[in-house]
Amino acid sequence: MRVLRLERPDPTRLIEEKIKVAQELYDVWGEGLLEDEEIPPLLERYRKAVEASNEAMESAGTFRECYVCTVQDKKGCCKIGLENECTVLILLLNLLLGVKFPEEREVPGRCFFVGPLGCKIFARPMLCRDYFCVRHYEKVPEEEMRKVTRVLNEELTLLYQITRLLRHRLESWTGDFLMELDLTGYGV
């Protein structure tokens, strides 16, 4: 008698498919998107907003606490499967910003985009940027957390605006059938 054994799907397959779709969109439409009158100025504003968020997070100590939690305490939030919070549009945005994706998962058991020194993508899903765990609230002063949240608001607002604009442009150029651009998930 044969016993059926359910295996958990590898979340790497889903992110690899999303990367493939984003790369194909970039190859075909990237030049047009980068020549669009609205997109480059938004990209520059977004780049500056991410840099400001990073400065605020570094100053507040949230990056340090994430490092200690992940590297020293062997815990951390960036676990395998979290990469699938990235939509095709966020991946496309990274390509427009010149980001190169890793070819494979570099840190076993961690998000596909985590390298030995942290996250390897620039544009990240909201969950990755605006998530503060109990450790942050215990270790980082409340006023610093408020500052970080205020600065992050600009970044996340621009992320929404850019991905909405990218979707609109792609749909107007290819037809209204690109629903999978906003797909998230942890399985295949």
Image: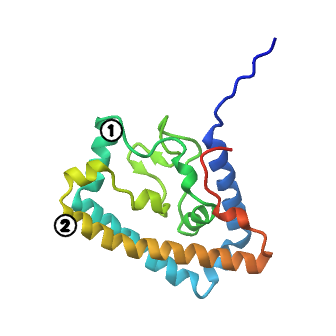
Answer above or below: position of 6 versus 99.
above
State the residue in front, 170 or 33.
170
Which residue is the extreme one toward the bottom? Answer: 37
State the residue in front, 21 or 5.
5
Please give the residue where the numbered disc 2 appears in the rendered image. 143
The secondary structure type at the circle numbered 2 is helix
Amino acid type of the residue that numbered disc 2 sits on in the rendered structure: Glu
For residue 170, side relative to residue 99 (left or right) = right
Asked whether the viewer can see residue 16, the reply is yes
Which residue is the extreme one toward the top? Answer: 1
Question: How is the protein colored in the picture?
Answer: rainbow
Please give the residue where the numbered disc 1 appears in the rendered image. 71
Between discs 2 and 1, the one toward the N terminus: 1
Q: Position of residue 34 (x, y in %)?
A: 61, 78
Q: Residue 165's image quarter?
A: bottom right
Q: Position of residue 17 (x, y in %)?
A: 69, 51
Asked whether the viewer can see residue 101, the reply is no
For residue 123, side relative to residue 137 (left or right) = right
Q: Which mark is residue 33?
A: none
For residue 31, side relative to residue 50 (left or right) = right
What residue is drawn where x is 78% and y is 70%?
177
The secondary structure type at the circle numbered 1 is helix
> Gap in Å between the C-alphas at discs 2 and 1?
26 Å
Q: Residue 81's image quarter?
A: top right
Q: Position of residue 69 (x, y in %)?
A: 30, 42
Q: Position of residue 111 (x, y in %)?
A: 50, 45
Answer above or below: position of 64 versus 158.
above
For residue 143, side relative to residue 2 (left or right) = left
